[in-house]
Amino acid sequence: MDATLRTRARTRLDERLEHLRPDGLAPPPKGWIKAIREALGMTGQQFAARMGIKPPTVIDLEKSEALGTIQLKTLSRAADALGCKLVYALVPKTPLQDTVDARARKIALRALKRVAHSMKLEDQAVGDSDLERQIQNYIRQHIKDRDLWAERD
């Protein structure tokens, strides 16, 4: 996939995921399963029967969901037993393009920092506006999407 297609793909994904930003979607403290089950007036025993599990297992299942250790397959079965649909998504904390731009900038700064240090020693330091221009040039000339994630921070 070329860079232009990746940029378009990022934009489309950002648009699709915008309404799912985590701010308004935090799970209840006791977890979604228990909160929905109780809101429906369904007992643990009734829920267990609908899932085809033993009643004591409901407590473990609800705890594992609240702790974030539940398996997706189990969560999907629980959702079905509650008359719900499991919606699974990875929602970026910031727009994908912003993430890519920030990563490219970080790599460029790291590379240019070495050059800037030696220039400063030679009393040839550059101003902030010149530095910004150098960063943008470095990104355009040296950084490709495939290079962004080659190393960890």
Image (cartoon, rainbow, N blue to C red):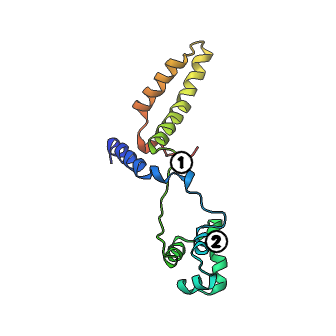
| Mark 1 residue crowding within 10 angstroms, few (<14) / some (14–19) / many (20+) | few
Residue 88, placed above or below residue 59:
above
Q: Which mark is residue 121?
A: none
Residue 136, placed above or below residue 83:
above
Residue 87 seen: yes
Circles 2 and 1, Cβ within 8 Å, touching? The answer is no
- At label 1, which amino acid type do we have? Lys
- Residue at point 51%, 39% (across, down): 103
Q: CA distance from mark 2 to mark 1?
A: 24 Å
Residue 92, how many percent across, how many down?
A: 50, 50
> How many marks can you see?
2
Identify the mark nearer the N-term, 2 or 1. 2
Q: Which residue is label 1 attached to?
A: 93
- Residue at point 60%, 61% (across, down): 27
Residue 69 seen: no
Residue 6, how many percent across, how many down?
A: 36, 46
